[in-house]
Image (tube, grey):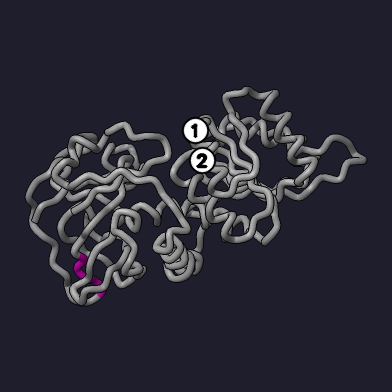
């Protein structure tokens, strides 16, 4: 079969021929793959720097994708074998795809939904009319997150980022306040404080960590022993601006801040079932009705080597069609 084949750790996958997988007929089923998104996880595994990097070569790359089962059902699934191929083995854990949702969008959505809905709904436990801050919202996941927050009834939706064009676009998705991080510490903290004073922030979904989250922490901390802080959950879902910060005890002692993380390690097996069986199907349905949008750039499998490291417009997900 044709596939994106990796011959050496740290190299680029190339279009080639490799033996097709065969189902054992027990806990496996064969998927005729139609599309698969290229995500940071895919690139990290190929680079050889991820704990789950590929060890046996040659191999097919790709973590997840969408396609057709032998009975004709359209599904999304995680791969037991590499998904950037004509065929892949998957488990019985599948998510149906609406008949009117295109494969490219269906392939692009799951990772973005995992990084947005799970921090917001499962870890942050969003309730209607709450005020949400998305710190670093101009990426693919952040754009989806704003739309999900709006759909689930958030009140004020504050977004930060460094791309002015996408910040403006986020207003069409439901953002009510935009802050450009390029303005610098004092300006950003001043704007955040003015918003927080008027619309106390209930949940922060942070995709940046590093310096930007310290500005948020400084803004949310209490001012005096007579000041009653508003309870705010900070859910970290990424570290694009830095992996470490200096967090003083005083910030936590002077505020009602709760800091949580969101990732595979923080989610239970039951919560991941909810993702596959409840949340993701609902997001697929929204997308099929043109109520949830994600920016994509699609290329055929034959061009995998050329587009693997291609510079795409900010906030765009690369998808390979097969």
| Residue 29 belongs to magenta span | yes
**The magenta stretch spans which residues?**
27-31
User: Residue 169 has which mark?
Assistant: 2
On screen, residue 291 versus residue 85, left or right, reads right
Measure the C-alpha gap from mark 1 to mark 2: 6 Å
Tell me which residue sits at (42%, 40%) in the image.
315
Q: Position of residue 38 (x, y in %)?
A: 30, 45
Residue 94 visible from this viewpoint: no
Residue 303 rendering spot, x and y as whole percentages: 16, 41
The structure residue drawn at horizontal position 49% and vertical position 46%, both measured from the top left corner, is 143
In contact (CB < 8 Å): disc 1 and disc 2: yes
Q: Using residue 45 as the reference point, say whether residue 180 is left or right of it.
A: right
Tell me the number on the disc at residue 165.
1
Give the image location of residue 284, x and y in percent. 41, 63
Q: Residue at x 92, y 40 (%)?
A: 226
Q: Which mark is residue 62?
A: none
């Amino acid at each position: 079969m044709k596939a994106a084949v990796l011959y050496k750790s740290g190299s680029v996958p190339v279009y080639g021929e490799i033996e097709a997988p065969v189902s054992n007929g027990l806990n496996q089923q064969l998927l005729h793959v139609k599309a698969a998104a290229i995500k940071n996880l895919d690139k990290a595994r190929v680079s050889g720097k991820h704990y789950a990097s590929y060890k046996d070569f040659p191999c097919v790359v790709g973590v997840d994708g969408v396609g057709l089962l032998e009975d004709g059902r359209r599904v999304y699934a995680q791969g037991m074998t590499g998904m950037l191929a004509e065929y892949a083995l998957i488990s019985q854990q599948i998510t149906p795809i609406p008949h009117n949702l295109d494969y490219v969008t269906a392939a692009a959505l799951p990772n973005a939904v995992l990084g947005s809905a799970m921090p917001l709904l499962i870890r942050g436990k969003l309730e209607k009319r709450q005020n949400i801050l998305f710190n670093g919202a101009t990426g693919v996941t952040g754009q989806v997150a704003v739309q999900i927050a709006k759909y689930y009834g958030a009140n004020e939706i504050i977004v930060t980022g460094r791309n002015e064009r996408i910040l403006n676009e986020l207003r069409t998705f439901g953002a009510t306040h935009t802050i450009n991080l390029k303005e610098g510490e004092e300006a950003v903290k001043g704007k955040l404080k003015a918003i927080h004073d008027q619309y106390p922030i209930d949940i922060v979904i942070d995709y940046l960590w590093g310096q930007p989250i310290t500005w948020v922490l400084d803004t949310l901390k209490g001012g005096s022993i007579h000041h009653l802080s508003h309870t705010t959950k900070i859910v970290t879902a990424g570290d694009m601006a830095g992996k470490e910060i200096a967090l003083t005890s005083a910030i936590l002692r002077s505020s009602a801040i709760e800091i949580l993380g969101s990732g595979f390690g923080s989610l239970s097996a039951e919560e991941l079932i909810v993702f596959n069986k409840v949340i993701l199907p609902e997001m697929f349905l929204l997308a099929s009705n043109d109520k949830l949008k994600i920016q994509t750039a699609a290329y055929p499998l034959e061009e995998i080597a050329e587009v693997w490291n291609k510079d795409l417009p900010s906030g765009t997900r690369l998808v390979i069609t097969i």
